[in-house]
Image: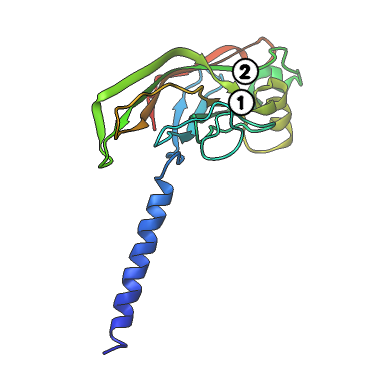
Amino acid sequence: MGNKRVPEVLGRLVLALLAGAVLVLTGPGSAQATTSVGIPAPTDGGIPATVKFYGAVVPQPYNPDPTAYFGDRKCLVVYHDYNATPGCGGFKLDVILHNVRDQSGYLAGLNSVGGRFAAYADIARTFGCLRADGTFDHGTSFVVRTEQQPLLDNYFFTDSNYILSWDRNHPEDEGPRFYVNFAPVQVSCPDGMTATQYGLKVTDVNISIDDPNVFGTTTWSTPGPFYA
């Protein structure tokens, strides 16, 4: 009879491990799912784009340390750190540009004179308080909104000539990359409740460049929305 209980015990152990893995993936400050959308070329024969929203961090509970560079409450990024922090939250946005190699300026071997790509988005973050049982008290919720907030450059990936160099030396398409690491928000909760960020919504994303040689004076836009 002892041997018959071994599969049962192992089955319970596997379920417990899987449950633990789910908690790790969905725990405080965990990254959210990836969402990609395509944007048609603004002109015939122009450059279409694919926008990827990913790496979003929604701190739950919300207890940021505005002075911390390390740890679960960090809000500051170190050198060459282009990620949302677990204390303040944020997200990443990659843009892949297609059909660049078919543009007349590219075929003529021209370099870009447009400098860097820029990106903007409307952003809404919902905050509030968790009850002792872990449920969200909607009566405490409030929304912090910013319209057309500039997204931050992810290293050299927003340099237009870097994109051209990549396309000339690799078969895969490339494009500018951006990220946002938010500033801390003050969330005050009644005794017995815990501050949390309830959600993140990103809409009306615009990526633009002014380059007469290859990319043109172009804006790629998508309404989204992207959620985390």
Q: As rendered, which of 90 and 189 lies closer to the eye?
A: 189
> Residue 197: x percent and y percent?
38, 30
Residue at position x 66%, y 17% in the image: 116
Colouring mode (rainbow / by chain / secondary structure / one colour): rainbow
Label located before the other in sequence (1 or 2):
2
**Which residue is labeled 2 in the image?**
117
> Residue 106: x percent and y percent?
70, 21
Q: Are marks 1 and 2 in contact (CB under 8 Å)?
A: yes
Q: Is residue 173 left or right of residue 35?
A: right
Q: Is residue 30 left or right of residue 106?
A: left
Q: Marks 1/2: CA distance?
A: 7 Å
User: Which quarter of the figure is the N terminus placed in?
Assistant: bottom left
Residue at position x 63%, y 25% in the image: 100
Residue at position x 64%, y 33% in the image: 81
Res 157 quadrant in image: top right
Q: As rendered, which of 58 and 47 lies closer to the eye?
A: 58
Res 222 quadrant in image: top left
Find numbered disc 1 in the image and state the secondary structure of the residue it sits on. Answer: loop
> Looking at numbered disc 1 in the image, what kind of residue is underneath it?
Pro
> Residue 57: x percent and y percent?
46, 35
Q: Residue furthest bottom?
A: 1
Q: Is residue 36 left or right of residue 165?
A: left
Q: Is residue 146 above or below residue 163?
A: above
> Looking at numbered disc 2 in the image, what kind of residue is underneath it?
Phe
Q: As rendered, which of 100 and 15 lies closer to the eye?
A: 15
Badge 1: residue crowd in 10 Å (few <14, some 14–19, many ≥20)? many
User: Which quarter of the figure is the C terminus placed in?
Assistant: top left
Residue 42 visible? The answer is: no
**Which residue is labeled 1 in the image?**
176
Find numbered disc 2 in the image and state the secondary structure of the residue it sits on. Answer: loop
